[in-house]
Amino acid sequence: MEQYAIKGGNPLVGEVEIGGAKNAALAILAAAVMTEETVIIENVPDLRDTMAMLQAMKSIGIQVEQLNRHTVKINARNISDLVIEDDCIKKIRASYYFLGALLGKYKKAEVALPGGCNIGLRPIDQHIKGFRALGADVRIEHGLIITEAQQLKGGHIYLDVVTVGATINVMMAAVMAEGQTIIENAAKEPHVVDVANFLNSMGASVKGAGTDVIRIKGVQKLHGTEYAIIPDQIEAGTFMFAAAVTKGDVTVKNVIPKHLESISAKLMEIGCEVEESDDAVRVVAAKPLTHTHVKTLPYPGFPTDMQPQITVALGLSRGTSIVTESIFENRFKYVDELTRMGASIKVEGNTAIIDGVPKYTGASLTAPDLRAGAALVTAALAAEGISTIDDIKFIERGYEDFPQKLQGLGAQIEKVNTERELQKFRLKVG
Ligand code: EPZ
């Protein structure tokens, strides 16, 4: 029965180090198979999802050596198979990055259809459209997506929706195609730029990542590299909102403040002080929080991956707030859990109407997905009394050492495995 047990009420105070960006790491690990030379990747977060990617790579004969907890050495010279259907890979979304990477280098890939968090329909039509525009055949058979090409040729691709996954996947497939590829209406997220920088460090020619037009000139071969992944924008944002809801004072360190602008702006709007320095951001929540409206949008808009965290904060903010989710249609499942803690939130379609309440109270909760799970942890840290959170496997997909990092800020949180451990926690926190 793995659970988090949390006693709320302590303001979080202190400093916390942010790890490497999960969603950049997942794509970069896949892209590392595109050269026969050795690739060393630093700042890889130690998470269930990154471990599943590495496990899948080993399953097709790729050499993976963990140099230390966050540095991995990869060599794909002896790749033995282009079929990835390892059991753990079926559970994660980013498995689709093997399609772009293997298709780009070996002109063939067979990958189990992606899983991932259940936050709404998650089609992959734009990935498929992009591969086809490069000349690949794509079909789905027996639960596998199969894509192959005699030869990949640069193409002009207009993405119908702004999608991080398809932008990165098509970019990977195009770096070794013949001629030039143009991706229009590309996603601009920091991790799109990070993957482009990684590919360029291997000898690719990708220009314009971070804008909505990406131009790729195909090269014949990629070479080895050493590369450090950017810090995780969403892990940082989660700690920033944890500071806000617990009336705390937290400095998130090892971040790129520019990537956090939309998050900082909303925190200031609701009454927090936010101080930026070169690689850190401090959030001080000295005043009562006030209401605001927010709509999730592709970068540089407010991230969908921060939507549950801001909703938790607005639930404790004076006045009425409106949160509109414009990326995924089913991302309010956690609201029922918050309601059981005393929140007053009504969901209509893709909108949550929130009437701020003075406090939450502890309850037995279940994490419905990764970010919602993390948001429930922040709610429990702000709440009066003890909460337990089940299904923490979701949270562990995206937050390394979450309880330990929170304990470092003064939180009373423990991972417990048995009823006895839970009782011990209750006795300890009083
Ligand atoms: C990535 O998912 C992230 N996952 C998600 O992070 C994140 O929420 C999302 O980007 C948005 O930032 C990974 O990087 C592994 P999209 P992805 O393609 O690639 C539609 C987390 O908590 N769409 O940017 O699946 C789609 O339905 C997770 O870390 C199509 O219509 O997201 C959505 O409405 C959860 N057709 C929108 O585009 C397609 O072919 C954006 O999706 C692809 C997407």
Image (cartoon, grey):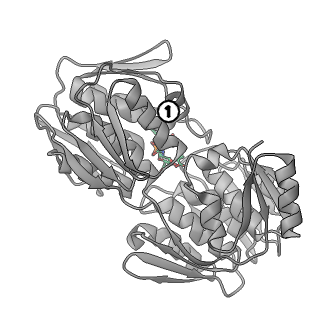
Residue 8, by quadrant, is: bottom right
Amino acid carrying mark 1 in the image: Pro
* Picture coordinates of residue 294, whole percent (x, y): 59, 65
- Comparing 17 with 322, the one in front is 17
- Comparing 50 with 408, the one in front is 408
What crowding class fits label 1: few (fewer than 14 Cα within 10 Å), some (14-19), or many (20 or more)?
Answer: few
The correct choice, above or below, for 226 with respect to 29 in the image is below
* Picture coordinates of residue 175, whole percent (x, y): 19, 38
Residue identifier under label 1: 123
Of the 4 image quadrants, the one containing the C terminus is bottom right
* Identity of the residue drawn at 20% across and 35% down: 35
Of the 4 image quadrants, the one containing the N terminus is top right
Q: Residue furthest top?
A: 142
Q: Is mark 1 within 8 Å of ligand 1?
A: yes
* Identity of the residue drawn at 56% across and 46% down: 397
* Secondary element at image label 1: loop
Residue 84, by quadrant, is: top left
Instruction: Name the side, left or right, on which 233 lies relative to 41.
Output: right
Instruction: Name the side, left or right, on which 156 lies relative to 5.
Output: left
* Picture coordinates of residue 324, whole percent (x, y): 62, 57
* Identity of the residue drawn at 16% across and 21% down: 151
